[in-house]
């Protein structure tokens, strides 16, 4: 009996020590789990934006400020242990609800960001385009505009500051948020070269226009046409005038020259505005596009309809279609009907 009690008394310390070790091990494992594998990302923000040149403190402050971490302290601890604090990479990172610190840090450390889907078309001014791009990518609008207005920069791509806008082909593109302004231009030039296939270039040469001139004319066609099916006819009309040395006399160029896009009725005072973009004053094409034309408008110029029309006027039924004419008397009759329709609707300007 005494011997059994002695054995029990000897086992007690062992059991206690084992229990203490077990509890300690469980505590360690729980702590390890909490810091690395426990859900720690909230759904308050869908993305984390890390600006170029940012350090870990900026990343940590952003995550805390936007409430993206349930436990910021465990993230900071894990980031130090995983050597992320010195390996910050800029970008746009998608935050998934209940993401663990380890998964989040691995994503940030490897630079596995989600690309931005950039889609643009029918943007009128370079300033509007720069504003749109800066809302989607890291560079601000001033960085985009400074390059668009830099003769030295755009000449590297074969453009002038007047026609560089023709380089941007309206479409959908994927690129990383932290793409620099310079790399954005390089990417757009690559897309421009892909768009202008030998077949398209051959069609441009057939009408004695460069790709940029085709796009400039397409910007007028796109501004005139409300319906895509009418674009080839309008394009053919302006090509007829261009080839014959007749002023294009396109109302959208007058509106652009006056920088007043509220004009609904072009008046004589608008026609007198001195500007290289006013095709009522200057013969030939404007120095640059009056808007970013659609691919449909560009292809309409390249695949224009052959006819004898040199005049057009909006239809008096306000359908968005036009009456076309090959001589002045027919055109004046069409114009009178439209002017009467405007007067009836009390559209004065």
Image (cartoon, rainbow, N blue to C red):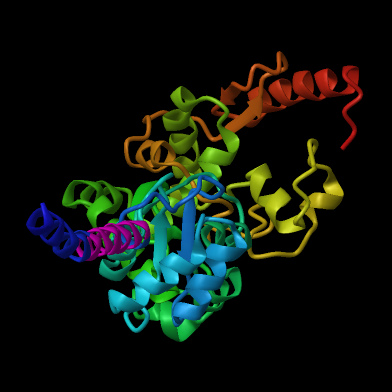
Q: How many marks?
A: 0
The spot of residue 161 in percent (x, y) is 51, 73
Q: Quadrant of the C terminus?
A: top right
Compared to 64, does 214 lie above or below? above
Q: Is residue 281 left or right of residue 204?
A: right
Compared to 332, does 93 lie above or below? below
Q: Is residue 187 left or right of residue 267?
A: left
Q: Is residue 315 left or right of residue 180?
A: right
Q: Is residue 87 magenta?
A: no
Residue with the most extreme left position: 3
The magenta span reads 16-34
Q: Residue at x 41, y 46 (%)?
A: 98
Q: Residue at x 50, y 65 (%)?
A: 72
Q: Nearer the viewer, residue 78 or 161?
A: 78
Q: Nearer the viewer, residue 103 or 122?
A: 103
The spot of residue 183 in percent (x, y) is 35, 72
Query: Is residue 287 at least partly visible in the picture?
Result: no
Q: Residue at x 28, y 74 (%)?
A: 82
The spot of residue 345 in percent (x, y) is 88, 19
Residue with the most extreme front position: 1
For the stretch drawn in magenta, the main secondary structure is helix
The spot of residue 308 in percent (x, y) is 45, 30
Q: Is residue 21 magenta?
A: yes
Q: Residue at x 42, y 60 (%)?
A: 92
Q: Nearer the viewer, residue 283 or 297?
A: 297
Query: Is residue 274 at least partly visible in the picture?
Result: yes
Q: Quadrant of residue 8?
A: bottom left
């Amino acid at each position: 009996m005494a011997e059994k009690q002695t054995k029990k008394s000897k086992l007690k310390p062992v059991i206690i020590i084992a229990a203490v070790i077990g509890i300690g091990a469980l505590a360690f494992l729980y702590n390890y789990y909490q810091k690395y594998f426990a859900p720690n990302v909230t759904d308050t923000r869908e993305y984390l934006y890390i600006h170029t040149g940012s350090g870990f403190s900026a990343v940590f402050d952003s995550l805390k400020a936007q409430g993206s971490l349930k436990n910021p302290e465990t993230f900071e601890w894990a980031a130090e242990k995983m050597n992320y604090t010195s390996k910050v990479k800029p970008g746009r990172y998608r935050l998934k609800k209940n993401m663990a610190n380890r998964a989040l840090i691995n994503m940030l450390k490897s630079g596995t960001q989600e690309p931005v889907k950039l889609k643009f078309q029918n943007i009128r001014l370079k300033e509007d385009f720069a504003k749109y791009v800066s809302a989607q990518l890291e560079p601000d609008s001033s960085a985009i505009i400074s390059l668009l207005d830099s003769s030295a920069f755009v000449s590297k791509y074969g453009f002038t500051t007047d026609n560089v806008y023709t380089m941007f082909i309206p479409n959908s593109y994927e690129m990383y948020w932290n793409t620099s302004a310079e790399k954005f231009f390089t990417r757009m030039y690559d897309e421009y070269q892909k768009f202008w296939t030998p077949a398209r270039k051959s069609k441009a040469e057939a009408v004695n226009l460069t790709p940029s001139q085709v796009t400039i004319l397409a910007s007028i066609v796109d501004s005139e046409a409300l319906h895509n099916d009418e674009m080839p006819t309008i394009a053919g009309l302006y090509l007829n005038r261009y080839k014959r040395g007749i002023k294009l006399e396109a109302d959208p160029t007058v509106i652009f020259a006056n920088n007043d896009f509220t004009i609904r009725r072009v008046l004589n005072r608008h026609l007198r505005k001195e500007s290289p973009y006013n095709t009522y004053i200057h013969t030939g094409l404007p120095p640059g596009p009056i808007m970013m034309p659609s691919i449909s408008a560009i292809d309409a110029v390249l695949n224009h309809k052959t006819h004898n029309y040199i005049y057009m006027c909006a239809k008096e039924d306000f359908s968005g279609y036009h009456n076309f004419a090959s001589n002045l008397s027919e055109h004046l009759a069409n114009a009178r009907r439209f002017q009467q329709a405007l007067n009836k609707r009390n559209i004065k300007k």
